[in-house]
């Protein structure tokens, strides 16, 4: 009997796992189950080129429809898994369908956080995770319309940039002192804040939204400090929470996502997790971490597939992501939650720099604005835990590759 591998979540991590299983020669049954009606697609364009109408949806697909047929991948779209029985190894789907498995990959990603405030459910208040969400926001975009962005994290910042590019008037409200403060710190967050200001975004920092108001549809947003902003629509970007409910009530351990080891294995035999939902042990940083990046979904989905086949390798990718806002390209590599030194190479004012987040003499992470090449060069420094000389790091004339060989 050939084994059945089931993947729950048919987006990037899940599709990447299915593709890898076939690439690696798995000849059993693959069932890929996804709650969304669309073929697996990439989300980054939803806040960028797709939102602005610059690329058709088909260009965002991970693979065309034929691929799944040709590779004998049983793709079940518009189907939600409601329950997993990890003892008898069987899933229950909406509509009472039951699917047995020999190995299971959970790639259910995340869902947007919501605000428990009045008016959140009014028409014209949007969040953004899926193609359907992006289509609804896009239908609102026209020069001169007025939008409020709630939260200047990556999604809020990118949507603000896309709306401004489309000629929409944008007011952004962010509780922190700058955009992206939690991830990048005040200095770098300030650069992003000025970028938006220079493109005409009116940003209100240090304030929070307490209410959306309107007769059936949002007409204004009220903040804690008493500011009232009239608008035609609002987009809320408050981050995501991992979608772990499929394993609720099972022995699978959950702590800020589904806990997995460096081989993407949960504590329950035959159950794996990857992508935004997985809180994975990272051998380079010696701790568990959960990231919400395109590159991780792609590579960890593939790594989990190899582990399901019994030929896994420790997943030790240095995490990397990018964000495009206006004509600025921001890239980040590594992982940090705190740092004791921030070393700068380049100029914040010219928006041409790479900044390194260090703990002790080692780089945990780096962020670059309009310097993608530097990010590629810094990844080996992070991965090999190189002890760096701070003056060399700061000096733009010292090739970053030389630091790697030191
Ligand atoms: C607007 C936007 C822009 C982004 N831009 C960038 C960027 O520029 N750079 C970057 O690095 N990253 C970016 N990201 C993040 C990146 O897209 C995610 O990290 C990636 O999509 C994670 O993939 P995933 O497969 O793990 O999870 P998801 O994409 O969340 O997919 C999980 C899938 O599982 C399905 N599912 C959940 N529960 C069930 C269930 N019970 N039964 C069946 N199906 C279920 C969901 O419907 C969903 O389709 C962006 C994300 C968004 C939303």
Image: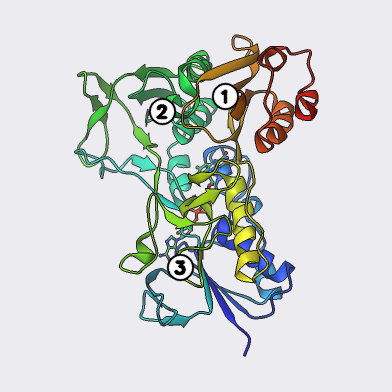
Q: CA distance from mark 3 to mark 2?
A: 34 Å
Residue plotted at (50% across, 19% down) = 196
Asked if 30 appears above or below 277 in the picture, the reply is below
Q: Is residue 98 left or right of residue 59?
A: left
Q: Which quadrant of the rendered structure holds the C terminus?
A: top right
Q: How is the image coloured?
A: rainbow
Rate crowding at label 1 as few (under 14), some (14 to 19) or many (20 or more) other CA atoms within 10 Å: many
The answer to whether the residue bearing label 2 lies less than 8 angstroms from the nearest atom of ligand 1 is no
- The residue that label 1 is drawn on is 358
Q: Position of residue 140 (x, y in %)?
A: 42, 38
Q: Earlier in the sequence, mark 1 or mark 2?
A: 2
Rate crowding at label 2 as few (under 14), some (14 to 19) or many (20 or more) other CA atoms within 10 Å: some
Q: Is residue 259 visible?
A: yes
Q: Which quadrant of the rendered structure holds the N terminus?
A: bottom right
Q: Secondary structure at mark 1?
A: strand
Q: Which mark is residue 145?
A: 2
Q: Earlier in the sequence, mark 3 or mark 1?
A: 3
Residue mark closest to the camera, 1 vs 2: 1
Q: Nearer the viewer, residue 205 or 230?
A: 205
Residue plotted at (44% across, 41% down) = 137
Q: CA distance from mark 3 to mark 1?
A: 45 Å
Q: Position of residue 356 (x, y in %)?
A: 60, 23
- The residue that label 3 is drawn on is 78
Q: Which mark is residue 139?
A: none
Q: Secondary structure at mark 2?
A: loop
Residue mark closest to the camera, 3 vs 2: 3
Q: Nearer the viewer, residue 16 or 281?
A: 281
Q: Secondary structure at mark 3?
A: loop
Asked if 264 appears above or below 189 in the picture, the reply is below
Asked if 312 appears above or below 338 in the picture, the reply is below
């Amino acid at each position: 009997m050939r084994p059945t591998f089931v993947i729950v979540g048919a987006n990037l991590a899940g599709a990447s796992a299915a593709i890898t299983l076939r690439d690696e020669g798995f000849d059993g049954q693959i069932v890929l189950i996804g709650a969304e009606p669309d073929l697996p697609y990439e989300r980054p364009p939803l806040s960028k080129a797709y939102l602005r109408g610059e690329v058709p949806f088909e260009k965002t697909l991970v693979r065309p429809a034929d691929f799944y047929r040709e590779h004998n991948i049983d793709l079940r779209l518009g189907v939600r898994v409601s329950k997993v029985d990890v003892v008898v190894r069987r899933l229950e789907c909406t509509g009472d369908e039951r699917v047995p498995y020999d190995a299971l990959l959970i790639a259910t990603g995340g869902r947007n956080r919501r605000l428990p405030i009045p008016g959140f459910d009014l028409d014209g208040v949007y969040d953004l995770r899926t193609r359907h969400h992006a289509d609804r926001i896009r239908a609102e975009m026209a020069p001169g319309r007025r939008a409020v962005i709630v939260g200047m994290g990556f999604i809020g910042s990118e949507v603000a940039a896309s709306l401004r590019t489309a000629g929409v008037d944008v007011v952004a409200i962010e509780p922190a002192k700058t955009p992206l403060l939690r991830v990048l710190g005040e200095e770098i967050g300030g650069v992003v804040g000025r970028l938006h200001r220079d493109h005409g975004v009116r940003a209100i920092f240090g304030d929070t939204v307490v209410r959306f108001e309107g007769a059936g549809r949002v007409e204004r947003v009220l903040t804690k400090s008493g500011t009232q902003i009239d608008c035609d629509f609002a987009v809320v970007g408050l981050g995501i929470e991992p979608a772990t409910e499929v394993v609720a009530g099972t022995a699978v351990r959950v702590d800020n996502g589904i806990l997995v080891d460096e081989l993407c294995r949960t504590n329950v035999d035959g159950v794996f997790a990857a992508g935004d939902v997985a809180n994975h042990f990272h051998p380079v940083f010696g701790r568990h971490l959960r990231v919400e990046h395109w590159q991780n979904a792609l590579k960890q989905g593939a790594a989990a597939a190899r582990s399901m086949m019994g030929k896994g390798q420790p997943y030790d990718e240095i995490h990397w992501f990018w964000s495009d806002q206006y004509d600025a390209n921001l890239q980040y590599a590594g992982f940090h939650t705190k740092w004791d030194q921030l070393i700068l190479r380049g100029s914040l004012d010219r928006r041409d720099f790479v900044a390194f987040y260090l703990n002790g003499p080692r780089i945990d992470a780096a962020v670059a604005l309009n310097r993608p090449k530097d990010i590629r060069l810094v990844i080996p420094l992070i991965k090999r835990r190189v002890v760096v000389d701070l003056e060399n790091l700061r000096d733009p004339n010292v090739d970053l590759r030389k630091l790697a060989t030191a």
